[in-house]
Amino acid sequence: MTTRKFFSISLLVLLTFTSLGMVTSTAFSQNVESLKVGEVKNFIISSKNPEIKDFSFIDGDGKTHQLSDYRGKTLLLNFWATWCAPCRKEMPAIDRLQGEMGSDDFTVLAIGQDLQGIEKVKKFLKALNIKHLGAYNDKTVTSGRSTGVFGLPATLILDKNGREFGRLIGPAEWDSEEAKNLIRYVMENPSSQ
């Protein structure tokens, strides 16, 4: 085989695999974009799937937890506050989502950003009759800021590797079929980075 023929065949093989990669990438993008409808139409898919840095927060008993404690699960990570009217509106849907889909593979982690502390969070959740969510708070608000969240409510979906799939700023009915389909997609397609 001549060098020229070898080069031509190698180039053809390279172009074929490159084209297949583009088709797969395009198909992936189109598939994900088709999930952004209804309640999650404003969901912003992360282009780089960054790993979220670890942070601390406390539970209703004052025990400290780390985000890394939840590694291995897909997370709906919600930042909210008791004074936030849109947060109050979306909290029952988030609670229903946890009640329906919470498992060894998925959990809703709703972390209050309330400067008045965990007692205020506990009273708020009790007043709304929240049954499935734990009482969590970070009165330093560094958890939200470390993830680039500056408005509430803000919800990130993290894959089981702790990487951000995407986020939605503002309220949504997180127990809607559209939202659940998006979550299921992330559960089935964790990042490989």
Image: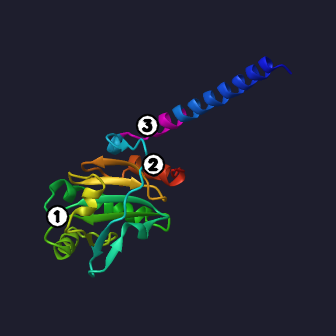
The quadrant where residue 143 appears: bottom left
User: Is residue 43 placed above or below 5 in the rendered structure?
Assistant: below
Q: Along the horizontal axis of the image, is 114 left or right of 39?
A: left
Distance between mark 2 and mark 3 Cα atoms: 12 Å
**Label 1 secondary element:** loop
Q: Position of residue 105 (x, y in %)?
A: 50, 64
Please give the label number shown on residue 82: 1
User: At label 1, which amino acid type do we have?
Assistant: Thr
Q: Which residues are magenta?
A: 27-37
Is 79 contained in the magenta span?
A: no
Please say if the residues under marks 1 and 3 sit with CB atoms less than 8 Å apart. no
The disc, 1 or 3, on the residue closer to the chain's N-terminal end is 3
The disc, 1 or 2, on the residue closer to the chain's N-terminal end is 1
Q: Residues within 10 Å of mark 1 (few under 14, many from 20)?
A: some
User: At label 3, which amino acid type do we have?
Assistant: Glu
- In this rendered view, identify the residue nearer to me: 44 or 177: 44
User: At label 2, which amino acid type do we have?
Assistant: Asn
The disc, 2 or 3, on the residue closer to the chain's N-terminal end is 3
Numbered disc in front, either 1 or 2 = 1
Q: Position of residue 37 (x, y in %)?
A: 37, 39
Q: Residues within 10 Å of mark 3 (few under 14, many from 20)?
A: some
